[in-house]
């Protein structure tokens, strides 16, 4: 048998889609897969992933979602990995899809949702832990927090977000507002503002929202109930999921902790996990 791994672009979707149907994510339609992996428009990089062919037939795929992000005051190339899958009869060739990833230079690589097996493999390849657990936050405030939130407001209207967001955050909204799953909210209190991007998820039939980006972390934690109200209006979420690294040393009363293992390989030692969010990744369009 002859194995070949090649980089592919948007033209390969029909070739790759039969492989993607092997994932247990039943909420994803064909067009959802196309949107998530093959039609994002924020990067000039035409590559969408690596395709493994055995004797000329598709046998495996690993998605690559490229973007440019400001990390530690510098503009960095970032590659979010997604959808590593290989047909069972060709699993012995699985690592051949990782080889070109390891050769990427000048690019921070993020693996936001590795399976337990993939986590072990990438960890052995010197990827670093990005996160180990998430906080599950119910809408249970302290008295002071509730009072602060009642004095605030929020907006989800696209015209308001386009008018009030500026700079990098306006660019984020322009890039990601067409993503099928991402929800965008703007929190306000006094002169303070906080832009938040979240994605709806369901667990055991209950609606939650996973926070992917927090524009002002201090504002968010001081006015968390305002975030709950805004995201509930947008998603119906009964609680929020927030990766623990975004809480820092803050007290998080009533929070439950659940595993959320993520990995990354930064280009520089000063790129800390707190600088990496869930934007420009599969999480913007993934229907769990």
Image: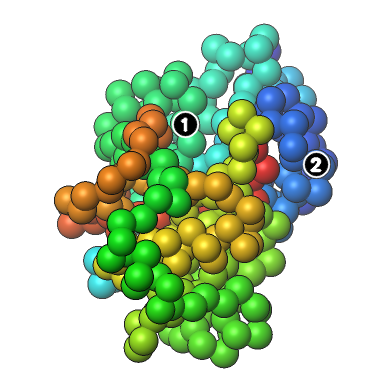
Please indicate, yes or no, whether residue 208 appears anywhere in the rendered image: yes
Quarter the C terminus occupies: top right
Residue annotated with mark 1: 114
| Residue at x 72%, y 53% (from the top left corner) | 35
| Residue at x 26%, y 72% (from the top left corner) | 73
Q: Position of residue 199 (x, y in %)?
A: 57, 53
Above or below, 173 against 224 in this view is: below
Above or below, 67 against 249 in this view is: below
Disc 1 secondary structure class: loop
Q: Quadrant of residue 264?
A: top left
Nearest to the observer: residue 239 or residue 30: 239
Mark 1 Cα shell of 10 Å, populated few (<14), some (14-19), many (≥20): many
Does 17 sit left or right of 177 as displayed?
right
Please indicate, yes or no, whether residue 78 appears anywhere in the rendered image: no
**Distance from the alpha carbon under mark 1 to that under mark 2:** 21 Å
Nearest to the observer: residue 1 or residue 282: 282
Does 63 sit left or right of 259 as displayed?
right
Residue contact between numbered discs 1 and 2, judged by CB atoms under 8 Å: no
Residue annotated with mark 2: 29
Q: Position of residue 19 (x, y in %)?
A: 73, 29
The earlier-in-sequence mark between 1 and 2 is 2
Q: Position of residue 87 (x, y in %)?
A: 68, 18
Quarter the N terminus occupies: top right
Does 191 sit left or right of 284 as displayed?
left
Q: Position of residue 29 (x, y in %)?
A: 80, 41
Does 81 sit left or right of 124 as displayed?
right
């Amino acid at each position: 048998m002859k194995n070949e791994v090649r980089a592919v672009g948007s033209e390969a979707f029909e070739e790759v889609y039969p492989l993607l149907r092997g994932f247990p994510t039943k909420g994803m339609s064909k067009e959802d897969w196309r949107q998530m992996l093959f039609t994002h428009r924020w990067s000039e990089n035409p590559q969408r992933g690596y395709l493994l062919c055995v004797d000329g037939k598709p046998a495996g795929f690993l998605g690559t979602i490229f973007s440019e992000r400001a990390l530690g005051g510098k503009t960095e190339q970032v590659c979010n990995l997604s959808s590593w899958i290989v047909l069972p009869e060709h699993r012995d060739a699985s690592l051949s899809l990782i080889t070109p990833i390891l050769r990427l230079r000048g690019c921070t690589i993020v693996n936001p949702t590795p399976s337990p097996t993939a986590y072990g493999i990438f960890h052995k390849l010197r990827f670093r832990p990005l996160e180990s657990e998430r906080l599950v936050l119910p809408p249970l405030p302290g008295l002071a927090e509730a009072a602060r939130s009642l004095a605030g407001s929020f907006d989800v209207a696209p015209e308001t977000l386009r008018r009030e967001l500026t700079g990098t955050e306006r660019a984020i909204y322009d890039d990601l507002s067409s993503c099928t799953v991402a929800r965008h909210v703007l929190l306000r209190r006094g002169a303070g503002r906080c832009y938040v991007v979240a994605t709806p998820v369901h667990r055991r039939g209950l609606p939650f929202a996973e926070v992917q980006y927090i524009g002002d972390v201090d504002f968010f934690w001081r006015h968390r109930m305002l975030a709950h109200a805004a995201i509930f209006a947008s998603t119906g979420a009964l609680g929020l999921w927030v990766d623990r690294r975004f809480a820092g040393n803050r007290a998080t009363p009533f929070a439950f902790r659940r595993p959320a293992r993520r990995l990354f390989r930064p280009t520089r030692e000063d790129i800390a996990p707190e600088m990496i969010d869930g934007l420009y990744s599969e999480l913007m369009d993934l229907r769990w």
